[in-house]
Amino acid sequence: MSTDTLTPGLVRINYRKVIARALADELATDPTVVFLGEDVGVAGGAFKATEGLKDRFGDRVRDTPISEQAIVGTAVGAALMGLRPVAEIMFADFAGVCFDQIVNTLAKYRYTTGGQAKVPVTIRMSNGAGSGFGPQHSQAAENWFLNVPGLKIVVPGTVEDLYGLLRSAIRDNDPVLVFEHKNLFALKGEIPAEPDDSFIVPIGVADVVRAGDDVTVVATQQMRHRAVQAADLLTAHGISAEVIDPRTLVPFDMETVRASLAKTSRLLVVQEGPPDGGWGATLVARTAAENFELLDAPPRLLACDPTPVPYSGPLEDAWLPDAQRIADAAERLVDY
């Protein structure tokens, strides 16, 4: 694994390669952790994100048939027998193939057994648009699972958060879906050179990426970075934007958003994907219902058009909100 040392005790690594590092640290820490999926072993993963794990951990890293149902079914069974499996679904869009197992077996097993059984399964999936993979390989599939009690959903947008949340997910005794954004694979960050539990990120805690006083912008993954760029653009207009990355969709850290609204009184949510039925629409509705007295303007959702993700590069770029569109929407809220 090639990394560049910057600070004593830390290494610089990209979003794609940190996946193998987080998995290796948990595989080395806990002998009950196992990892399975299509081409994750010998080939090192479809995106080369799991290279070297098979050589180091042997049969604890298993290549499976091309069957998402077999992968999730095996993970559920392994968890019930005392293991702590990590299953990879190559593209998040393929979760549709094993949707029943995730929502009707995995999510409900602990509840339907009255807590007698636990299913500490982590399912990793690559999601998101912007990389030219077309409508069936680029969806924000995390939104599909929001209405399924029993699942935790994490959406790390930085190298540090991916490392810390993936390790946290593997240690959790409930099922956790970890969505890794394909268009962030080249993003770089810093993690400890050696395993360090202090870098584990707790599930359910948001990150205030940038402090501000005039408008609160809440965004995840790719949109988090574009929101920060938008905040830079807004400074030229004398507008101070606070950017919050929830990092976890379920459970959602509403307290951090509420504390920000107590300062700014304005909310802009930026969601990758169509507007209806997503985490952003849920946050806007919840804010209006629970924190109406904090608002000086209607909360707004900025999302993609309600169409499949375009394959054409220029159309895909136009489909995704960019920094200027985010800045314009925030400025309209401030001027309301």
Image: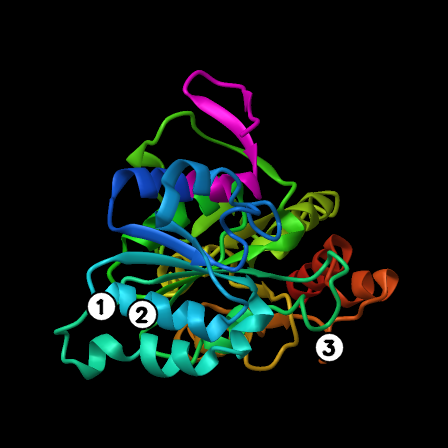
* 130 relative to 112 in the view: left or right: right
Residue at 50 percent of width and 53 percent of height: 245
Q: Which residues are magenta?
A: 1-22
Q: Earlier in the sequence, mark 3 or mark 2?
A: 2
Whether 43 is drawn above or below 7: the answer is below
Question: Residue 227, image x and y in percent?
Answer: 64, 52
Q: Amino acid at mark 3?
A: Pro
* 321 relative to 284 in the view: left or right: right
- Badge 2, how many Cα within 10 Å: few under 14, some, many 20+? many
Q: CA distance from mark 1 to mark 2?
A: 6 Å
Q: Amino acid at mark 1?
A: Leu
Whether 217 is drawn above or below 22: the answer is below
* 200 relative to 160 in the view: left or right: left
In the drawing, what numbered circle is on residue 135?
none
- Badge 1, how many Cα within 10 Å: few under 14, some, many 20+? some
Q: Secondary structure at mark 1?
A: helix
Q: CA distance from mark 1 to mark 3?
A: 37 Å
Residue at 59 percent of width and 71 percent of height: 93
Is residue 283 visible in the rendered structure shown here? no
Q: Nearer the viewer, residue 21 or 245?
A: 21
- Badge 3, how many Cα within 10 Å: few under 14, some, many 20+? some
In the drawing, what numbered circle is on residue 80?
1
Q: Where does label 2 land, which residue?
A: 76
In the drawing, what numbered circle is on residue 308?
3
